[in-house]
């Protein structure tokens, strides 16, 4: 994070409020100046003195008090703090506070500051799983995202209430990365149209069953968000996903491999970069049952290969369009990945070892190898947002070197 970035941290009343102190310290380690706003409920969990000692600033909580400006005159503090900040971070955000933000209510210092702040807003919710999944909360999250705010969705796990499920405060690193993404303005992809596929395709067996995989779409949406921040126009072709969609990108849904291929090819003429992160099924059922199959002793399914979307993109792309493939493998077999790169004719392939615990499918972290025809860059384990930035660094490097294709059996693709 650039030095002297000013973060206004809004802390709401929940068990995760104590983690805001650790979040504050990590923001400071990244070079940010942090001031804190607390709701009345937050002060029931953590004393303001804690944040005052860590931040070196008094905590803002009273909507009705007037402050003093640098020139000695009085100022309306919730207006002044909203103007001071480079980014407003609300973490943890409760269901109650998000409802107020979504509906424009301003009955305390934090909600009034939110309405007066024209800077980027990052929201990291934390709450009981039933509250998180309630239709009202989901509607409020959608409204906040549509407003252009970054919502760092909570993780699943054991909650303070004793239940297990979604609602647990996201990892500090992920929240800090979201803040950094708002204040780091890189424009090296301005003028590019990046077409990204993500998620896992589903191939029907009968009207209710399908062949699928555990892809969440997190890596693809992380790439989409990063490319958007760097100035690109982004189109995402998404199969089944559980990850939060990237804000500011066009999202097109496609369920099967055939539907994804059709969607990609229909938008290919617009693209200057294609990144294929989707986990596309290699096989589909040759004959899909028209009615739900009944239980029996055994069932034999005849499978056939699905479309090779990367190869079809390479064959149809316009001159100058970069194609980046992904290979999810059980292990880091570089030779195998290079053979796949050569066979498909892409400009680069990202090798993702999904056999390692804690990275790959449905995880928040990843570690990959970025392979070109004659090069290899190791991108070590990090949050997927960080990995996405490093992958785009390599893509930008390819663009700057003017790489338009690789040798595929004597034929130059692209």
Image (cartoon, helix red, strand yellow):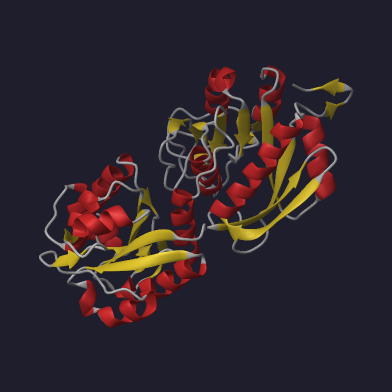
Left or right: 17 as drawn, with respect to 40? right
Q: Tell me, yes or no, if residue 341 can be seen here.
A: yes
Image x and y of residue 204, in percent: 51, 34
At a point 52% along the width and 26% down the height, the residue shown is 259
Q: Where on the picture, by quarter, is residue 24? A: bottom left
Q: Residue furthest front?
A: 71
Image x and y of residue 184, in percent: 50, 49
At a point 41% along the width and 36% down the height, the residue shown is 248
Q: Tell me, yes or no, if residue 200 can be seen here.
A: no
**Relative to 299, is 352 above or below?**
below
At a point 21% along the width and 79% down the height, the residue shown is 44
**Relative to 10, is 178 above or below?**
above
Pick the front one: 308 or 251: 251
At a point 85% along the width and 40% down the height, the residue shown is 374
Q: Where on the picture, by quarter, is residue 54? A: bottom left
**Relative to 297, is 190 above or below?**
above
Image x and y of residue 103, in percent: 17, 47
């Amino acid at each position: 994070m650039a030095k002297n970035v000013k973060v206004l941290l809004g802390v709401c009343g929940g068990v995760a409020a104590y983690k805001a102190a650790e979040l504050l310290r990590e923001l400071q380690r990244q070079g940010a100046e942090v001031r804190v706003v607390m709701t009345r409920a937050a002060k029931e969990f953590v004393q303001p003195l804690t944040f005052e000692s860590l931040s070196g600033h008094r905590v803002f909580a009273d909507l009705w008090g007037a402050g003093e400006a640098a020139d000695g005159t009085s100022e309306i503090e919730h207006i002044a703090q909203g103007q001071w900040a480079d980014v407003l971070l609300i973490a943890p955000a409760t269901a109650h506070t998000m409802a107020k933000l979504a509906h424009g209510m301003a009955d305390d210092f934090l909600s009034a500051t939110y309405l007066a702040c024209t800077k980027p807003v990052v929201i990291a919710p934390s709450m009981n799983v039933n509250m998180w999944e309630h239709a009202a909360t989901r509607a409020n999250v959608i409204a906040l995202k549509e407003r252009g705010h970054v919502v760092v969705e909570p993780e699943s796990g054991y909650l303070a209430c004793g239940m297990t499920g979604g609602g647990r405060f996201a990892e500090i690193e992920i929240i800090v990365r979201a803040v950094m993404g708002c204040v780091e303005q890189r424009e090296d992809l301005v003028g590019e149209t990046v077409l990204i596929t993500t998620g896992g395709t589903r191939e029907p067996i009968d009207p209710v069953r399908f062949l699928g995989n555990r892809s969440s779409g997190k890596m693809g949406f992380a790439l989409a968000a990063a490319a958007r921040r760097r100035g690109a126009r982004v189109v995402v072709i998404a199969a089944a996903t559980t990850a939060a969609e990237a804000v500011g990108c066009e999202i097109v849904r496609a369920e099967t491999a055939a539907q994804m291929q059709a969607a990609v090819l229909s938008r290919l003429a617009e693209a200057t970069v294609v990144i294929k992160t989707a986990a596309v099924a290699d096989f589909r059922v040759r004959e899909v049952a028209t009615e739900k199959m009944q239980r029996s002793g055994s069932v034999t399914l005849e499978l056939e290969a699905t479309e090779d979307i990367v190869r079809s993109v390479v064959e149809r792309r316009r001159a100058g369009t970069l194609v980046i493939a992904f290979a999810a493998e059980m292990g880091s077999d570089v030779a195998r990945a290079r053979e796949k790169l050569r066979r498909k004719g892409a400009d680069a392939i990202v090798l993702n070892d999904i056999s390692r615990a804690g990275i790959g499918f449905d995880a928040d972290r990843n570690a990959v190898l970025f392979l070109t025809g004659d090069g290899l860059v190791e991108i070590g384990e990090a949050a997927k947002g960080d990995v996405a930035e490093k992958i785009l660094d390599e893509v930008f490097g390819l663009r700057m070197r003017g790489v338009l294709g690789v040798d595929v059996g004597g034929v130059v693709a692209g």
